[in-house]
Image (cartoon, rainbow, N blue to C red):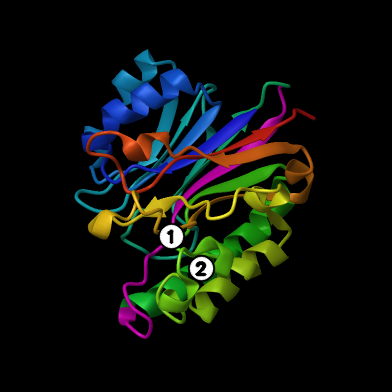
Amino acid sequence: MKLATWNVNSLNVRLGHVLDWLQANPVDALCLQELKLPDDKFPHEVLRAAGYHACWAGQKTYNGVAILSKTPPLDIQRNIPGYEDEQQRIIAATLTGPDGKPVRVVSAYCPNGQAVGSDKYAYKLDWFQALRGWLDEEIVRHPDLAILGDYNVAPADEDVHDPEAWAGGILVSDPERQAFRDLLELGFRDTFRLFDQPPRTFSWWDYRRLGFRRNAGLRIDHILATQDLAARCRECTVDKTPRGWEKPSDHAPVVATFHTA
């Protein structure tokens, strides 16, 4: 079973990229972030024609998340239960794996935070706390659970192209990294770090200052899986190819492959 995540930075702009990538990489599920379109503009018919069911939480201009899947999404959850938030950042669904067993999948677009100490930074930390509380319950109900998305956190210095320049700043500050570790402490594993990886592997590169060409990036897109599911993970990679396409997203897809139970 292959699960993938991709912040497409506008599905309207990048729909062709998504369709081309899915044709070349027919994953079982693709989690999308930053749709930047309202619910009624979601291209579900085009995606269905490409062989994918979909569930989504859209928002005009900002945010928005979706799950594209080979099997119909069940028990769909939109946003964090009990957490009042106008920003559309979470969609969850139960999918049927190739072995017929259920896998709970969450697509998450975690807040950026803007700047350490700002109101948006406080919102980010509060949002992560709410996410942790919800996942603490979800992990009990769903032994096979994966949360995929743009976390807007580079967990360690090895995930940053220039740790000294970024030290203490947004995306790498100690409270943000602690919020990420708090998720791991629930019983999740960072599937990318289950394997030896090429050094300086990132998933996001700034459009400015030739970030991609210089590989001046961060690894902020992650696939976390519960212990049982992570034990069956056989590979996790970043596909940099779409980042080199014309008018690309500033993020690249991350893909994890799991053996069935």
Q: Quadrant of residue 157?
A: bottom right
Q: CA distance from mark 1 to mark 2?
A: 8 Å
Q: Position of residue 149 (x, y in %)?
A: 48, 49
Q: Quadrant of the N terminus?
A: top right
Residue at point 39%, 64% (across, down): 111
First in sequence, mark 1 or 2: give its number.
1
Determine whether 171 is above or below 206 in the image.
below
Determine whether 29 is above or below 194 in the image.
above
Viewer can see residue 89: no
Label 1: state its secondary structure.
loop
Pick the front one: 55 or 175 = 175
Q: Position of residue 66 (x, y in %)?
A: 40, 39
Q: Assess whether residue 122 is covered by the magenta stretch.
A: no
Residue at the limit of the structure toward the front, as seen here: 214
Q: Position of residue 177 (x, y in %)?
A: 56, 72
Left or right: where does residue 217 sit relative to residue 94? Answer: left
Pick the front one: 122 or 19 = 19
Label 2: state its secondary structure.
helix
- Dot 2 corresponds to which residue? 128
Q: Quadrant of the C terminus?
A: top right
Identify which amino acid the numbered label 1 is placed on. Cys
Left or right: where does residue 250 sit relative to residue 3? Answer: left
Identify which amino acid the numbered label 2 is placed on. Phe
Q: Which label was assigned to residue 87?
A: none
Q: Quadrant of residue 184?
A: bottom right
Residue at point 57%, 35% (across, down): 3
Determine whether 224 is above or below 179 in the image.
above
Residue at point 33%, 42% (across, down): 8
Q: Which label was assigned to residue 110?
A: 1
- Residues rendered magenta in the picture: 100-119
Q: Position of residue 68 (x, y in %)?
A: 45, 30
Instruction: Say whether marks 1 and 2 touch (CB < 8 Å).
Output: yes
